[in-house]
Image: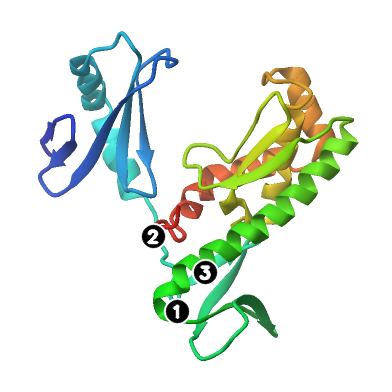
Amino acid sequence: MSRVRISESALEFEDLTIPLTVKRNRAARRISLRIDVPRRGAVLTLPARAGLSAGLDFVAEKAVWLRNAYARLPEAVPFAHGAVIPLHGRPHRIEHRPAARGGVWRECLGEAESIVVTGAAEHLPRRLGDWLRREALALLDLRTRAKAAAAGRAVARVFVRDTRSRWGSCARDGRVHYSWRLVLAPDFVLDYVVAHEVAHLVYMSHGPRFRAAVDRLTPHRAEAEAWLRVHGASLLLVGASIG
């Protein structure tokens, strides 16, 4: 590996610079390092008692891994005319029609699928992002309530956000949060994530009883987990500038 200079703001290789963000987390039990996919950087998390020097030493130990992981990052896909983004796991071409009216909608011509966005070009990213959020919320709310009913539990409310480190979360009071980007993934992936969060309404841990509950709610656990390991990062780079 080429020589690397490490500071609290970056890893500087001879031919590559990777931005580094240092965060402290009192709940963290150990030093950790991860790729921030949308921002194309790295995040170093330090527990309360860990010093910065120990954290940077940890980064140095992981420099080879970090460089290799960074090199494998897919390219960002902007919300722009002609770009192709996934929707329900299928490629859709973004088509901008500035003179048309009607907001945003899907069109299918034979096997070709597109998402039409009307209005001024400068509003296209926001309009498309808002539409995808609404589509995600409607689908996730319906699926979550159906699975919760099957599990004998109630859902307080379903939210969608642009989460970076997890696809969903469930609170004890019945509130369930998801990444809106699940609407980009194949249905079996979304179905699994919903089953995972609904199972937390029954068991808040990740033990054997929890996994059995997930498997009762979806047949897709193994397949979806494998898909997310391979393709999850690419979802974070679709319209990456949209919050």
Q: Residue at x 21, y 26 (%)?
A: 60
Gap between marks 2 and 1 measured at Cα: 15 Å
Spot occupied by residue 76 in the image (x, y as percentages of width and height): 39, 60
Q: Is residue 207 above or below residue 218?
A: above
Q: Amino acid at mark 1?
A: His
CA distance for labels 2 and 3: 19 Å
Q: Is residue 161 above or below residue 155?
A: below
Q: Residue at x 59, y 77 (%)?
A: 103
Mark 1: which secondary structure?
loop
Do tag 2 and tag 1 residues touch (Cβ < 8 Å)?
no
- Which of the 4 quarters of the picture holds residue 45? top left
Task: State the residue lying farthest toward the bottom.
Answer: 99
As drawn, the label of residue 241 is none
Q: Position of residue 235 (x, y in %)?
A: 51, 54
Residue identified by numbered label 1: 81
Which label sits on residue 76?
A: 2
Q: Nearer the viewer, mark 2 or mark 3?
A: 3
Neighbours of disc 1 within 10 Å: few (<14), some (14-19), many (20+): some
Nearest to the observer: residue 66 or residue 102: 102
Q: Nearer the viewer, residue 160 or 222?
A: 160
Give, as a three-letter code, the residue at label 3: Arg
**Residue occupied by mark 3:** 127
Q: CA distance from mark 3 to mark 1?
A: 13 Å
**In front: 109, or 63?**
109
